[in-house]
Image: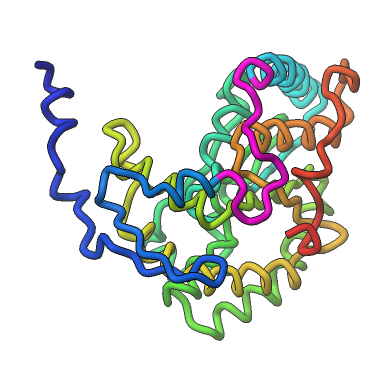
Amino acid sequence: MSALGKDSKKKPERLKSAKSTLKLNIDGRTRNFDIDNPKLPDWVEDGALVSRDFPYTDKMSKDEYGETLEQLQIQLVKMQYWLQDTGQRVMIIFEGRDAAGKGGTIFNLRQYMNPRNARNVALPKPSETERGQWYFQRYVSHFPTTGEFVTFDRSWYNRAGVEPVLGFCTPEQHESFLEEVPGFERMIVADGIHFFKFWLNIGQIMQLKRFHDRRHSPLKNWKFSPIDIAGAEKWDDYTKARNEMMERTHTAHAPWTIVKSNDKRRARLAVIRRILLSLPYEGRNIDVIGKEDPLIIGSGPGFL
């Protein structure tokens, strides 16, 4: 038996949850969910895709998704040539709850782009030095230069969600952030950067399913952490923080684009389409890009 085969049957100590059974309020009903139990409960399996009023009862087919994605990725390569030829700059931030699909969306977005000019930024927790800096400082240092396409897998909006919910910032710091963000983002747009803000919206039961998949996958269990458990139990707190963030930071110059992401395939295509339809790159083929799905993608808090 291979080393992988042996290891995959073990239960690594670092993956054992200090608290494996979660008591959750889902749609007004109390549910117990044991993340360490390899068998996924039927109520999670059956209710995941349609949770949070997702408009489709079936995932997009693999064939349709693959064919559409390839055509859109060809357009992304054309777009990158345009960036290099014109010196335009693009910056995209991806936010959403844990397991909403940010990493996979970014991967598919950048898969065939030249990595020399297309970077992804996924910052770890701030160092001691960074904690003493202006809050936005460590993010600004990663902004795009001429001809660059930069994505952020989480961004300065940590201070609007994760930090206040888990107690990593003070109420005063949270309030100051919400007051400052609109002006900060106005400067980004005024400097000529093409700026996108995506919120990937996932249903509560789908989040549990994806946590369970991570927990029991020998390939993806590195994604699973105690923060996932803490976040699952604070669903309502995150909802409250998200709603306040949306109300105060959805602006005309830097609007939030909401993408319903229970079906990762539809969500990824929706994100790529929005970017391609928003940039006037040379050789843009509107027919190939296709129309947006208004059931999946919309603008601002009203779409949540």
- For image coordinates 60% across by 20% down, the residue present is 62
- Which colour assignment does the render follow? rainbow
Q: In the rendered view, tell whether residue 284 sits above or below residue 168.
A: above
- Magenta region: 49-65
Residue depicted at 54% across the width and 42% down the height: 101
Q: Is residue 239 above or below residue 106?
A: below
**300 or 134: which is nearer to us?**
300
| The residue positioned farthest toward the bottom in the image shown | 172
Residue 245 in the image: above or below residue 272: below
Q: Position of residue 248 (x, y in %)?
A: 74, 72
Relative to 175, 21 lies left or right: left
**Number of residue marks:** 0
Q: To which quarter of the image does residue 299 belong?
A: bottom right
Which residue sits at x=66%, y=38%? 267
Foreground pick, 113 / 3: 3
- Quadrant for the N terminus, please: top left
The x and y percentages for residue 17 are 23, 58
Q: Nearer the viewer, residue 140 or 161?
A: 161
The answer to if 166 sits in the magenta stretch is: no
Relative image position of residue 277 (x, y in whole percent): 85, 32
- In the image, 10: left or right of 290? left
Residue 68 x, y percent position in the rendering: 72, 19
Residue drawn at 74 percent across, 47 percent down: 196
Q: In which quadrant will I find the C terminus?
A: bottom right
In the image, is 182 to the left or to the right of 112? right
Where 46 falls versus 304 (above or below)?
A: above
